[in-house]
Image: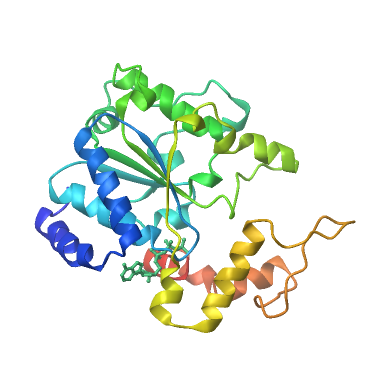
């Protein structure tokens, strides 16, 4: 249970801060929540555009009215950034070998308390959805139809997917590039139902007023949008020397991003801060 007063305070503090594009999306989502008809919306948001900021507000708004809003993410680290966030696998009890199971369903009994929550919830927000295997989303669709006895998409549940396809796609061990494309949500039969909304303004750049943050965010977008030429033999791109700190091994990468992880790995606040 959430404290509705605390949630309302978050809402009244945050709404006046929204930028115009954040406000438009916030209003669109809240309209879909009130309509209660179930929709599939994809929030396309490159890093730093305020996706977490906006999602946190939507969660707080629904919870301030005693409504149920579920927040899941494809990775544990992204789940730590959302209030009450869980990984999609654990929240929906998805089967472990989902990539080999095109007809999968979630392991949720119709009479269970989780099924009741899924029946009553006003929105499901799935962050970092671009990392999810399409079978996971399809399993959720089948399960919600069954639990809600409703043949509409996701049994009439409002689903907000968020993420950035320029970043990480599903990770499939020993797979080819084509396997990853086939596995991603855009290849799902459900994807044509998606309404896309977009955040474009990088709030980190805007708030920090830092020209190097602006250059970095532009370079990142150019790579994600395929504007940087591929090396003809290797198919790799060459990173500019001013792009980031280049390291030599996976261990060094972990050390730089998560220093002291062997001590801090149970400290959720620390994990969320460095995520
Ligand atoms: N309208 C706003 N007013 C004030 N601060 C904002 C606003 N929108 C975003 N921010 C701040 O900008 C920063 C980036 O926002 P946020 O973390 O939500 O971005 P994101 O899209 O989730 O980024 P990433 O995917 O890289 O984690 C945060 O510090 C957030 O608090």
Is residue 227 or residue 69 the one in the foreground?
A: 227
Report the side of 260 relative to 197 (left or right).
Answer: right
Q: Residue 130: image x %, image y %?
A: 53, 46
Indicate whether 183 appears above or below 153.
below
Residue 143: in sight, yes or no?
yes
Location of ligand 1 given as a quarter of the image: bottom left
Write the residue at 42% across / 33% down.
93
Q: Observer-nearest residue: 73 or 62? A: 62
Percent x, y of residue 98: 56, 31
Quarter occupied by residue 13 = bottom left
The answer to whether any part of residue 95 appears in the image is: no
Q: Nearer the viewer, residue 175 or 27?
A: 27
- Percent x, y of residue 17: 25, 68
Q: Quadrant of residue 236?
A: bottom right
Residue drawn at (62%, 35%) of the image: 183
Left or right placement of residue 212 versus residue 194 in this view: right
For residue 201, above or below residue 66: below
Residue at x 35% of width, y 16% of height: 151
Above or below, 8 against 187 in this view is below
Q: Residue furthest right?
A: 233
Residue 247 placement (x, y as % from top left) = 71, 74
**Would residue 211 appear left or right of 171 to someone viewing this image?**
left
């Amino acid at each position: 249970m959430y404290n509705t007063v605390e949630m309302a305070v978050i809402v009244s503090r945050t709404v006046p801060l929204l930028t115009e594009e954040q406000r438009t999306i916030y209003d669109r989502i809240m309209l879909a929540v009130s309509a209660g008809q179930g929709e599939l919306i994809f929030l396309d948001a490159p890093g730093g555009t305020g996706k977490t900021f906006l999602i946190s507000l939507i969660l707080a708004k629904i919870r301030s009215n005693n409504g149920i809003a579920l927040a899941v993410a494809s990775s544990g680290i992204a789940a730590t950034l959302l209030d009450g966030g869980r990984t999609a696998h654990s929240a929906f009890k998805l089967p472990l070998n989902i990539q080999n199971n095109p007809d999968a369903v979630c392991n949720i009994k119709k009479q269970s308390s989780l099924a009741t929550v899924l029946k009553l919830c006003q929105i499901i927000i799935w962050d970092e959805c671009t990392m999810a295997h399409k079978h996971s989303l399809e399993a959720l669709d089948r399960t919600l139809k069954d639990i809600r006895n409703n043949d509409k998409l996701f049994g009439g549940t409002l689903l907000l997917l968020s993420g950035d396809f320029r970043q990480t796609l599903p990770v499939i061990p020993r797979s080819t590039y084509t396997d990853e494309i086939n596995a991603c949500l855009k290849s799902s039969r459900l994807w044509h139902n998606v309404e896309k909304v977009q955040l474009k303004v990088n709030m980190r750049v805007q708030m920090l007023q830092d020209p190097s943050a602006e250059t970095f965010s532009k370079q990142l977008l150019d790579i994600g949008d395929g504007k940087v030429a591929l090396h003809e033999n290797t198919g790799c791109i060459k990173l500019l020397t001013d792009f980031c700190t280049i390291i030599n091994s996976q261990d060094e990468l972990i050390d730089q991003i998560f220093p002291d992880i062997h001590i801090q790995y149970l400290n959720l606040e620390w994990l969320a801060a460095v995520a």
